[in-house]
Amino acid sequence: MTVVPPPRTLPDEMALLLPSTAPDLWRAAVERAAHLLAPSWQEHPSLDLTALSFLLLMWSAEREQSPASLSAEAVAEELSVQGEQPQELRDLSRRIEAAATDAGVLGRGYGPGTLDPLWADLSCWSEASDDEAEGHPPALWAAVGRLRDVISGLTEAALRHASPPHPSLGTWTVSVSHRVRVVSPAAILSITCTTCGSREGGELHIDGPAVAFVCTHGHDTTTRRLEVQRVRNALAHAGLPAGADVSVEGDLHVTHRDCHAQSDPRHLSRFTAAVLA
């Protein structure tokens, strides 16, 4: 049976940006960004919401206004005057990082509940497949152009007809009776507690963008192999709901980050089909 994972809704995307320890200013920026994107939301790349949230935080700091008080027209104006040359976009990144650091949103490290990993995904160059190439520009650069197109014709009058979206539940738990296994086309690896080596049983604690594996002895393990969207996908393919506390009997199979996020882990290759049949 073909399983189609549920679409990534705007409330779900908001929840990914809002760990329980998120500062109030960041929460306000995410809520305002979601309101501005709601009229045109059609499963935008999730980084558009992240990018607009960071931009709103910066503009609110520079204008000494709250994110909620930045009108659609003001946001459209800011986007329209933003240059597209590499140096102008680098300057924009520095302004965002300075404002977010001063506000206590960034600079808190890379552990669970911190927002620095979100900014790194948005602002860092990605490696090129060719050693001779420079690499791929930060995702923020392309997001600015997309946001300019989306926000350009938006008005506060139009926003009054769109109810502000509210985030989905951002903190929830997946209890697993056996193992959490990360599946790639050529390998299947069990998540292992970095403290005691335990693999059997345990829980996944989801908090905003972070996933932590908590073993049966209560030790926390955070690994880049686990991502919230991939856990949601794993639950969908297991026939279980995501976004609320849930129990899994047996193994939970999560696709490796190099695979498409919505892939069925059982059918990545002949190897996985045979082992996970």
Image (cartoon, rainbow, N blue to C red):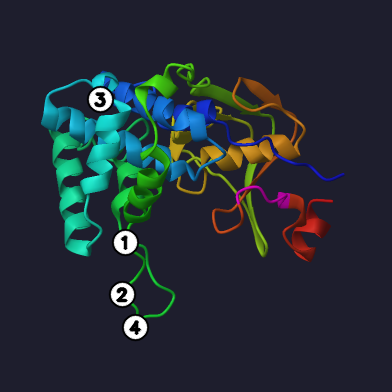
Question: Which residue is depicted at the point 15% across and 53% down?
Answer: 91
N-term mark: 1 or 2? 1
**Rendering coords of residue 245 (x, y %):** 61, 20
Question: Which residue is depicted at the point 44% across and 35% down?
Answer: 210
Magenta-tinted stretch = 261-265
Amino acid marked by disc 3 = Leu
Q: Nearer the viewer, mark 3 or mark 4?
A: 3
Disc 1, SS: loop
N-term mark: 3 or 2? 3
Amino acid marked by disc 1 = Trp
Amino acid marked by disc 4 = Glu
N-term mark: 3 or 4? 3
**Quarter-of-image position of residue 30:** top left
Question: Which of the pair 203/114 is nearer the observer?
Answer: 114
Query: What is the chief secondary structure element of the magenta stretch?
Result: loop
Q: Hey, which residue is sitting farthest right in the picture? A: 1
Question: Which residue is depicted at the point 22% across and 49% down?
Answer: 82
- Determine the CA span between mark 4 and mark 2: 7 Å
Q: Which mark, by number, is residue 134?
A: 2
Q: Which mark, by number, is residue 70?
A: 3
